[in-house]
Image (spheres, rainbow, N blue to C red):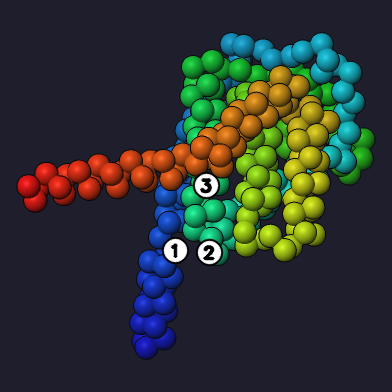
Amino acid sequence: MKFLKALYFNMGEFVHKHREGIPFLMYTAVYLTWFSILEQNVIVPKYLIHLSADNHIPFIPQFIIPYELWFPYVLVTVLYLLFTAKDEYWRVFTFLVTGMTIFLIISTLWPNGQDLRPNLIGNEGFFEGWVMQLYRTDTPTNIWPSIHVYNSLGIEFAIARSEKLKKHKLIKAGSFILCILIILSTMFLKQHSIFDVGTAIILAVLMYYLVYYVDIIQVVKTAREKKQAEKEYVRKH
């Protein structure tokens, strides 16, 4: 009984200490629900995304490795910043949530998809089989802009700008390489058109400017503090 009480107390203390992670969990639930609804309802996309340049990009199944590494790449970085650098966490949170919400809105208003995938029959090899599993679980719809590309850049920017990781050059170099490989994987696996990738990069650069140069979080915080100070002044006078 004492053990359970201690565990309950420690868990409560842990959650309180890292309560900034709650919005991330809440948004993840909203995003997955919204995206799941889109995946179930957009069977035949209204807008097909396919550039002629896409036909010249080869299918390279080995790129399934960096493609799948995207998931721990994003999650581990977000959790690391949540536990070690709250200011940096809020920047990457703002970056990711903004882009993912824009993606959901675009997919809702303009149902889109692609027809780039090769016809795999399952006996081509290990990596081809792995890609087939991906194709079965991830439909070729709701692809613009590429969240794989956008979020990878968001994570790379966060790591590159991180004060906590300033001296860890190997981690920064590894992040840069992995980011590039993930971006390439979206095209080599025929998951995305060059158009999806290019627009995701443009959106990421715009958000980088707003989050790290304009520092939109600090701008909003300062505006709130100013408004609160004005209210306090009016109340006292």
Residue 168 in the image: above or below residue 212: below
Residue 233: x %, y % from top left: 15, 47
Please tell me which residue lies in front, 45 or 167: 167
On residue 18, which mark appears? 1
Q: Are marks 1 and 2 in contact (CB under 8 Å)?
A: yes
Q: Nearer the viewer, residue 54 or 214?
A: 214
Q: Amino acid at mark 1?
A: His
The answer to whether 102 is drawn above or below residue 82 in the figure is above
Q: CA distance from mark 3 to mark 1?
A: 16 Å
Q: Is residue 214 left or right of residue 71?
A: left
Residue at image coords 49%, 21%: 108
Residue 48, position in %: x, y? 67, 12
Q: Disc 2 marks which residue?
A: 83
Left or right: where 75 falls relative to 20: right
Callout 1 crowding tier (Cα within 10 Å): few <14, some 14–19, many ≥20: some
Residue topped by disc 3: 91
Q: CA distance from mark 1 to mark 2?
A: 7 Å
Vertical order, 213 against 198 (above or below): below
Residue density around tag 3, few if under 14, some if 14–19, many if 20 or more, within 10 Å: many
Closer mark to the observer between disc 3 and disc 1: 3
